[in-house]
Image (spheres, helix red, strand yellow):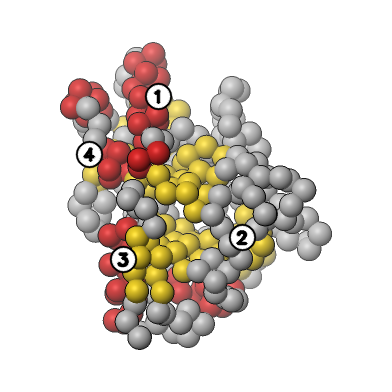
Amino acid sequence: MALAITPLSDALAAEIRGVELTQPLDDQTAQAIRRAWLDHLVVVFRGRDLSQKDQERFCRAFGEFERVKSGRAMDDDNPHVMYVSNVRDEGLKTTLEDGEMWFHSDQCYFEQPVAATTLYAEEVPSRGGNTRFANGYAAYETLSEEIKRRIDGRHALNAYDYGDQMLVKDGPRPADAPQFVHPVVRTHPETCRKAIYVNRLMTEHIVDMDRDESDEILETIHSHVEHPRFIYEHVWRPGDLVMWDNRCTLHARTDFDPAERRKLRRMTIKGDRPV
């Protein structure tokens, strides 16, 4: 059966149907999925009953696993598996449990951030807890020429310093917080397109720039990237598997009732150093 690829918004994201993810992917199917992922930045597979082994096999078709670096891995035997969950009655080691979360790019505070992130929904709340994705390509391409000029060749410091506070950055950064300097605009290693690579949650400042000017430019960029025209909001259903390109998208989480259960299984694919 041929893959059916249906765009989910004008901004980015597509649903893929016509593929059985409980079986190994043949090379042709894996290449078609990869092409759709590069074209649409986010791919969605709905209503799947996937074991951890199924998700692992799917991920291996697209690269090498990255271990969990900031968060709690499932266990020593599964250093690449993390649960994004507020479920506390199953003995799971969980990460990023409750509430809203600002836009960010996974592991942008390490030298080699992940290329791809996958999430599989086991349990979701009745409302909220959605994931919003922003198109970094389109955001860059529509920036004013003045802002493009001011950020050309610039780099910014990204740090993992928010702890449980995912909507404020009002304290000093811990001395041991993971941090790394990356381009404000990165070039995708496969498509060669430029994308915004700073974000509201983890980017601290543009280096070698007056702090007031850096704050002004970053706020302009953040507000621009977060405009609805660049965003697809994914409303999770149990059995959804979503894979996004961490090199050219940002993502955020909407608030939800902490009394409701939210449990998603996360695995990531290794990337390279942004340029």
Which mark, residue 36?
A: 3
> Dot 1 surroundings within 10 Å: few (below 14), some, or many (20 or more)?
some
- Inspect the image, locate mark 3, and give the three-letter code of the amino acid beneath it: Ala
- Left or right: 188, with 164 as reference point: left
Q: Amino acid at mark 1?
A: Glu
- Cα gap from disc 3 to disc 2, whole angstroms: 23 Å
Whether tag 2 and tag 1 are in contact, CB under 8 A, the answer is no
Could you tell which of marks 4 and 1 lies nearer the N-terminus?
4
- Expressed as whole percent of the image width and height from the top left, the position of residue 120 reads 56, 65
- Amino acid marked by disc 4: Glu
- The residue to which callout 2 is attached is 264
Label disc, if present, on residue 219 of the rendered structure: 1
Q: Earlier in the sequence, mark 3 or mark 2?
A: 3
Dot 4 corresponds to which residue? 141
Q: Are marks 4 and 3 in contact (CB under 8 Å)?
A: no
Residue farthest right in this picture: 89
